[in-house]
Image (spheres, helix red, strand yellow):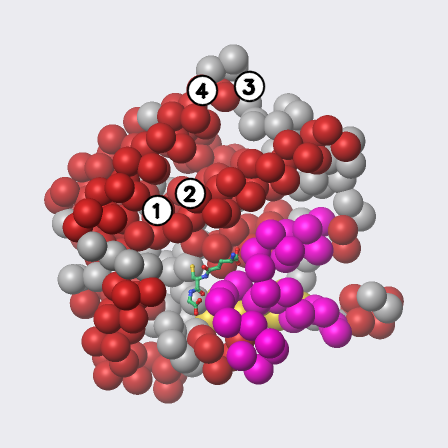
């Protein structure tokens, strides 16, 4: 990228409650890379991302660069800021960070999302509030009209059924158990003794099942969610991996 392009202010297109958006936002904040956030309500986000050749959020516009995947955004931000920050330069460590990040992106993120949506989709007042935080005024005004279609689409796109929801919760518990087992040797971070994209990805993508303090994704408070959800969140918070993610938010966010 030319110097001129990299000097242009970055724009991060998000949805307020998206955990992949929180992952990208956390990286930009942590690296002190200046950016402006442009949040949209679900469905209308496609008008914003589609204009730049994307679909999902987050999408980063930085000069002439367009990045449509959170991992690419984190890598790009790290490189722009000099490298060796969220991704160690040392080959073996970097490979391990990449391996874990891919696992959290491909598995943890979809399963936490499916379980959390299954709990919250019936709570339309809560949804309206979190999904409209910071969005353009017209979109906030349109959201109540769009919400029935948004809920239907989310249910079908993420194949949310009572069975798949239970399976996702079981996968989340297994992934937490795996991360807990890695931490059992006393390490403070997943790879290389310092905060990396692996820790950031785990904590950000676990956020929908932990409701961490310091998380900048728009969530209801824990006392507003259904009691069964609250109880499961409390259980997951008490696990080693849950404690680890909460510590990452407290110390690195
Ligand atoms: N692999 C993508 C996944 C992003 C993703 O799934 N984003 C969701 C929100 S959390 C989304 O935009 N879904 C709506 C859509 O795809 O239009 C990334 O890491 O950025």
Q: Are marks 2 and 1 in contact (CB under 8 Å)?
A: yes
**In this rendering, is residue 88 above or below 159?**
above
Q: Which mark is residue 108?
A: 2
Residue visible at 20% across and 55% down?
161
Spatial CA span between label 3 and label 4? 11 Å
Give the magenta range.
Answer: 50-78
Please tell me how crowded label 3 is: few (under 14), some (14-19), or many (20+) other residues with Cα within 10 Å: few
**In this rendering, is residue 164 above or below 93?**
below
Please tell me how crowded label 4 is: few (under 14), some (14-19), or many (20+) other residues with Cα within 10 Å: few
Q: Is residue 129 visible?
A: no
Please tell me how crowded label 2 is: few (under 14), some (14-19), or many (20+) other residues with Cα within 10 Å: many
Using residue 210 as the reference point, say whether residue 223 is left or right of it: left
- Is residue 74 one of those drawn in magenta? yes
Tell me residue 73's x, y (percent): 63, 57
Look at mark 3 in the image and give the residue it sits on.
187
Q: Are marks 3 and 2 in contact (CB under 8 Å)?
A: no
Disc 4 within 8 angstroms of ligand 1 (CB): no
Residue visible at 48% across and 55% down?
20
Disc 1 within 8 angstroms of ligand 1 (CB): no
Spatial CA span between label 3 and label 2? 21 Å
């Amino acid at each position: 990228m030319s110097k001129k392009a990299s000097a242009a202010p970055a724009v991060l297109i998000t949805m307020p409650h998206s955990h992949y958006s929180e992952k990208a936002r956390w990286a930009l904040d942590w690296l002190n890379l200046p950016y402006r956030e442009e949040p949209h309500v679900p469905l209308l986000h496609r008008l914003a991302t589609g204009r730049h050749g994307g679909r999902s959020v987050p999408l980063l516009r930085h000069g002439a660069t367009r990045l449509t995947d959170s991992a690419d955004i984190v890598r790009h931000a790290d490189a722009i800021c000099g490298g060796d920050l969220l991704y160690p330069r040392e080959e073996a460590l970097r490979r391990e960070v990449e391996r874990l990040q891919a696992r959290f992106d491909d598995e943890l993120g979809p399963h936490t999302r499916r379980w959390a949506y299954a709990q919250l989709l019936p709570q339309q007042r809560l949804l309206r509030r979190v999904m409209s935080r910071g969005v353009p005024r017209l979109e906030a005004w349109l959201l109540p009209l769009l919400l029935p279609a948004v809920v239907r689409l989310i249910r079908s796109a993420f194949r949310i059924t009572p069975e798949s929801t239970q399976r996702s919760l079981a996968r989340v518990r297994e992934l937490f158990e795996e991360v807990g087992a890695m931490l059992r040797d006393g390490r403070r971070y997943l790879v290389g003794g310092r905060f990396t994209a692996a820790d950031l990805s785990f904590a950000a993508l676990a956020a929908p099942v932990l409701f961490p303090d310091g998380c900048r994704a728009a969530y209801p408070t824990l006392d507003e969610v259904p009691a069964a959800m609250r109880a499961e969140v409390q259980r997951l918070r008490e696990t080693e991996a849950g404690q680890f993610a909460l510590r990452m938010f407290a110390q690195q966010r």
